[in-house]
Image (cartoon, grey):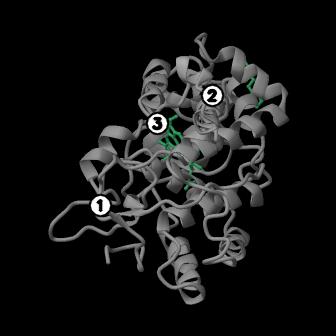
Amino acid sequence: MGFLFARSSGYSFVALALLACVLLAPCQAAKAGLSIKFYAKTCPGVDTIVRSVVAQAVAKEPRMGASIIRLFFHDCFVNGCDASILLDDTLTFTGEKNAGANINSVRGYEVIDAIKSQVEAACKGVVSCADIVALASRDAVNLLGGPTWNVQLGRKDSRTASGTAANANLPGPASSGASLVAAFAGKGLSAREMTALSGAHTVGRARCLMFRGRIYGEANINATFAAALRQTCPQSGGGDGNLAPFDDQTPDAFDNAYFKNLVAQRGLLHSDQELFNGGSQDALVRKYAGNAGMFAGDFAKAMVKMGGLMPAAGTPTEVRLNCRKVN
Ligand code: HEM
Ligand SMILES: *[C@@H]1O[C@H](CO)[C@@H](O)[C@H](O)[C@H]1NC(C)=O
């Protein structure tokens, strides 16, 4: 800590900034060189374009808001928030779209394309696809009734994508509570941040394939809830793709119902209910269930922090012109 007392004002500024980093969530983004004003001069209209395209998409189909939120998570957890998930497979690499964790499941690519084409028309070659996903997910949360926040900007897009990395980094629905904590810790996110971010499962849908084991095999599930889900999701004979909402009361509202559901043993996925199953996150789940504002605040902060995940230093990047392929 000696440098804290360095006489040069430059050094003490750095020391203060480092200290602030320990205390403030947006610091990870700041360290990565991001800023909320990144496009203030070069593309001042980007926020408005993103918001209006996402608003149209959500008005047409509320679930699309959920899908865009998930797109951001699945981008950031695989080699950083670098739009790697948006790259189509090529002859030389198998990307993330068709990896087991994403195929037939992640959606919203067309909405990102629609935003990108409008943004390119307004300011060519300036705004990264990764930043568009970050902005779009912020707007999706807010348009569904959740909080809003300032998005740190200045990300660059990857020049490659890895299906193997997607499968290795994205947690699955059979995960234990301990493995969820570990998966997020591996990205520098705390157990509390993991639980807050999981609150995104207050919107959106999951396929029968993802929750069949829970509704036919588990004891810590409300019997009425399980019986209703069995109507959607047969035990055998197909139906893998049949959808159920994560939150059956307010399926498209970004509220704290996810946590109320967990307390009532109405988590849809095994991994959801692991956050309230006599383990380390029970007390926090109860707090979020009883305090929507606390959840909203923690969720917004954790999204900013997750958005600071960056590709490893030295990784080649660019601002893609078409989000689906490298320049
Ligand atoms: C904690 C670990 C997590 C696990 C194990 C997990 C797992 C899943 C699974 C299995 C689905 C359904 C996929 C399908 O049916 O094909 C899903 C959907 C979804 N996830 Fe997660 N997830 C996690 C964390 C997150 C986080 C951190 C976010 C965002 C901040 C998120 C946002 C969503 C959303 C919004 C949907 C619904 C998407 C739609 O309807 O298109 N999830 N998740
Ligand atoms: C399960 O949920 C229903 C409402 O759908 C409720 O009436 C019932 O009391 C719950 N069961 C338990 C054991 O909490």
Give the structural element (helix, strand or loop) at label 1: loop
Q: What kind of residue is marked 3?
A: Arg
- The quadrant of the picture occupied by the N terminus is top right
* Res. 169 image quadrant: top left
What's the residue at 62%, 44% (across, down)? 303
What's the residue at 62%, 46% (across, down)? 304
Label number found at residue 316: 1
Residue at which label 2 appears? 19
Q: Is residue 256 above or below residue 254?
A: above
Find residue 130 and report its horizontal and vertical position in percent: 49, 62
Q: Residue furthest left?
A: 92
Mark 3 lies within 8 Å of ligand 1 (Cβ measured): no
Q: Is residue 86 above or below residue 242?
A: below
Counting residues from the start of the chain, the first of labels 2 and 3 encountered is 2
Give the foreground label among 3 and 1.
1
Label number found at residue 212: 3
Q: Residue furthest front?
A: 7
- The quadrant of the picture occupied by the C terminus is bottom left
Determine the CA span between mark 2 and mark 3: 47 Å
Give the structural element (helix, strand or loop) at label 2: helix
Counting residues from the start of the chain, the first of labels 2 and 1 encountered is 2
Q: What kind of residue is marked 2?
A: Leu
Label 1 neighbourhood size at 10 Å, few (<14), some (14-19), many (20+)? few
The answer to whether one can see residue 63 in this image is: no
Give the foreground label among 2 and 3.
2
Give the foreground label among 2 and 1.
2
Query: With 81 as the anchor, is 259 left or right in this view?
Result: right
Q: What kind of residue is marked 1?
A: Pro
Q: Residue furthest bottom?
A: 121
What's the residue at 69%, 71% (across, down)? 47
Find residue 29 and report its horizontal and vertical position in percent: 56, 46
What's the residue at 68%, 26% (across, down)? 262
